[in-house]
Amino acid sequence: MASQKYNFYKALILNPLTDLKCDYYPQGLLVIKDKKIKDLLPYEKGVKKYADKITKTNLVDFGHSVLMPGFFDMHFHWVQDDVREMPKDSLLEWLQKYTFPTEMKFADKKFSQQRAKHFFKKLSSAGTIGGACYSSIHETALAAAMDEVQGDFVIGNVLMNMNSPEELTQTEDESLLLTKKLIKKYGKRHCFTPRFAITTTPKVMKEGSRMADKAKCFKQTHLSETPAEIDFVLSIYKKLPGFEKVSSYTEIYEKTGMLGKKSLMGHGIHLSEKELNTLKKTKTSLIHCPTSNAPIKDKGLGSGLFNFKTVEKLKVRWALGSDIGGGPFLSMFDVMRSFVDQNKKIKNSAATYTKALYRSTLAGAEILGVSKTAGNLAKGKEASFIIVPLDKKIKPRTAEELLSKLIGQHKLKREKYDSLVGATFYKGKILFK
């Protein structure tokens, strides 16, 4: 009976390790014992090593398919699935015209449950098994998301107390009471989520941050996505008591206790060196969303290009996110493509697919503090991975070449990325096939 504890998977295998290194087995064997990764090695070697354990029933041959870790999408709004491809002339206008009216619908419990069922199934089918997610302001929508999501996720309801449509505005007390209630109910799965400094008062950010820190919860918000947003934020805060002398967007979050090791700042495109040093000092992470920040002609918001070289030079932690619905497609394959393509255009050769894969998997798991069990295919981790069919004509020699060919084939039909994955496994269980 001992052999029943084992499962063996044969495929082309990718195992991201760092920005520069990814193990690649053109014919690899992933060995699972009791739903944990026991070994990863070349197929021929594995067959010899485990000859007494392999049987006809416990070996699955995925043929010419790629086996790789599932994705971590570190910044997305599940309630914005319906506005992913709406016209995006400017961030603030897009929010007013499309996003806010859509989010208002999530006050309805039945609507929230139906949408959550649909969305989180789609997320599993895209191979995403971890990350950080924004919900609407509504408790019903957050409950629906928590019920349906499968994987290593933190989720928060956005908090909005000022400069927001009437139907999406809470009082400060409502925001704080709800935060307290949700932390009690969901513990560390809850993520404290002021939408951004424009919509959330300093009191809510300060007191909510204290609650989140005490409960060891993550915190997330948006930072310096567009120059217009930065100007607007500063114009609001310079009129508020105690903030008259703030010189930057980052300083506002620093003064309200929003920064820290468990803080995730979406975008962070337009930041000074002083701000980046503050993020480094506080161990705050930046989440880069290339498809959302891409030019308008590429279905993005045209916010600008994240300077990851400076971010890395100043030792600020970062990972990738889709920013659904600023980003038009759910798949992290599309996010990786966009990251590489946009940087290629400015001749930045450091933006490789190897780096993009690491920043879409292990880097996210490291930031979320789950890298001991998730993020790649290292021994001892949970059996969480995806299977991606590959054209038999493609016979890559390196990890970079494999990713480049796999992703490059759909550049002109980006919607195809959402259905590239053939199967998604999470902790040894099939989430999608």
Image: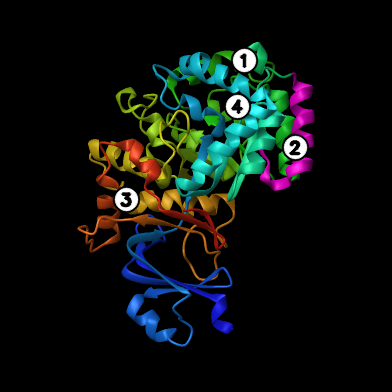
Q: Which residue lies most toward the bottom here?
A: 52
At mark 1, the secondary structure is loop
Q: CA distance from mark 1 to mark 4?
A: 10 Å
Determine which quarter of the picture holds residue 185: top right
The image's mark for residue 353 is 3
The image's mark for residue 182 is 2
Q: In the figure, 355 relative to 6: above or below?
A: above
At mark 4, the secondary structure is loop
Q: Which residue is mark 1?
A: 164
Asked whether disc 1 touches disc 4, contact meaning CB atoms under 8 Å apart, the reply is: yes
The crowd level at tag 4 (other Cα within 10 Å; few <14, some 14-19, many 20+) is many
Q: Earlier in the sequence, mark 3 or mark 4?
A: 4
Q: Which residue lies most toward the front here?
A: 57
The image's mark for residue 195 is 4
Q: Give x and y (percent) for residue 53.
A: 48, 83
Q: Earlier in the sequence, mark 2 or mark 4?
A: 2
Q: Earlier in the sequence, mark 2 or mark 1?
A: 1
At mark 3, the secondary structure is helix
Instruction: Inspect the image, locate mark 2, and give the three-letter code of the amino acid beneath it.
Output: Leu
Q: Give x and y (percent) for residue 70.
A: 47, 54
Q: Give x and y (percent) for residue 101.
A: 56, 16
Q: CA distance from mark 2 to mark 1?
A: 22 Å
